[in-house]
Image (cartoon, rainbow, N blue to C red):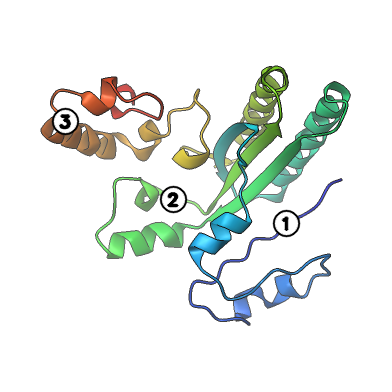
């Protein structure tokens, strides 16, 4: 079953925020909007549940409906491929879009900035994330290359549109084949490498800690 989920976050705790009124007016099967905490939100909506194999791929794209439509079209094909391979239907896919407006970078700069590179964004973007969640290792081996191909195809299409594909990559959703730290820009990469050299001269975190993205490889 295909469902559309809107995740509306209002950190000022205004239950009837003007910016969301048109979205809240759309017909819904379930409305879970309520005053809550960030911790509770994370617990309620977990895109990567335990006990399953989770495949992710992400890119930052222009806020352009044509790219959204292409991503959704390719997502439908992935679903059909997984349905044919996973007979019991025990899998989940997500075609996720999260806004990344330039105002975030502007506000960050006002407070001193950070090393994530969002202050360098020149265009309003959207974080696109392709997700597949499956039960077995064999299913992951089948799903992963297809999910990666989906993500790359969206990127290829976005490149055909002016400023359609932005350089910035959100680390939390990135695939192991991606290089999110490098997307922060050369100046920020240098700052991170300088900090690593100062506080971890023996490269314990670069060489002895498994997993994760390493600044030494950015």
Secondary-structure class at tag 3: loop
Using residue 211 as the reference point, say whether residue 25 is left or right of it: right
Q: Picture quarter containing residue 54?
A: top right
Assess disc 3: are there few (<14), some (14-19) or many (≥20) residues with their C-alpha within 10 Å of its C-alpha.
few
Using residue 214 as the reference point, say whether residue 29 is left or right of it: right
Secondary-structure class at tag 1: loop
Whichever of labels 1 and 2 marks the residue nearer the N terminus, that label is: 1
Assess disc 1: are there few (<14), some (14-19) or many (≥20) residues with their C-alpha within 10 Å of its C-alpha.
few
Q: Position of residue 46 (x, y in %)?
A: 61, 49
Q: Picture quarter containing residue 189?
A: top left
Whichever of labels 3 and 1 marks the residue nearer the N terminus, that label is: 1
Quadrant housing the C terminus: top left
Q: Choose between 119 and 129: the one closer to the eye.
A: 129
Q: Residue at x 21, y 38 (%)?
A: 191
Secondary-structure class at tag 2: loop
Assess disc 2: are there few (<14), some (14-19) or many (≥20) residues with their C-alpha within 10 Å of its C-alpha.
few
Q: Distance from label 1 to label 2 (Cα)?
A: 28 Å
Q: Is residue 15 above or below residue 213?
A: below
Whichever of labels 2 and 3 marks the residue nearer the N terminus, that label is: 2
Q: Which residue is mark 3?
A: 200
Q: Residue at x 62, y 42 (%)?
A: 49
Which labelled disc corresponds to residue 122? 2
Q: Position of residue 118 (x, y in %)?
A: 39, 50
Q: Which residue is mark 1?
A: 5
Query: Does any portion of residue 150 appear in the rendered image?
Result: yes
């Amino acid at each position: 079953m295909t469902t559309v989920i809107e995740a509306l976050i209002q950190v000022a705790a205004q239950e009837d925020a003007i910016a969301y009124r048109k979205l809240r007016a759309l017909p819904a099967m379930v409305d879970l909007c309520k005053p809550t905490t960030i911790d509770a939100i994370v617990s309620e909506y977990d895109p990567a549940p335990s006990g399953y194999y989770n495949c992710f791929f992400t890119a930052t794209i222009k806020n352009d409906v044509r790219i959204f439509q292409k991503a959704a079209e390719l997502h439908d094909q992935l679903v059909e491929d997984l349905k044919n391979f996973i007979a019991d239907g025990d899998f989940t896919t997500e075609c996720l879009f999260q806004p990344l407006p330039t105002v975030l970078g502007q506000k960050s700069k006002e407070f001193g900035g950070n090393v994530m590179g969002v202050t360098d964004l020149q265009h309003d973007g959207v974080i696109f994330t392709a997700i597949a969640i499956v039960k077995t290792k064999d299913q992951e081996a089948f799903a992963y290359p297809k999910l990666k191909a989906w993500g790359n195809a969206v990127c290829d299409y976005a490149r055909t549109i002016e400023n359609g594909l932005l350089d910035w990559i959100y680390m939390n959703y990135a695939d192991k084949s991606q290089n999110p730290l490098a997307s922060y820009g050369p100046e920020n990469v240098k700052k991170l490498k300088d900090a690593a050299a100062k506080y971890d001269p023996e490269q314990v975190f670069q060489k002895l800690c498994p997993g994760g993205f390493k600044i030494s490889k950015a």
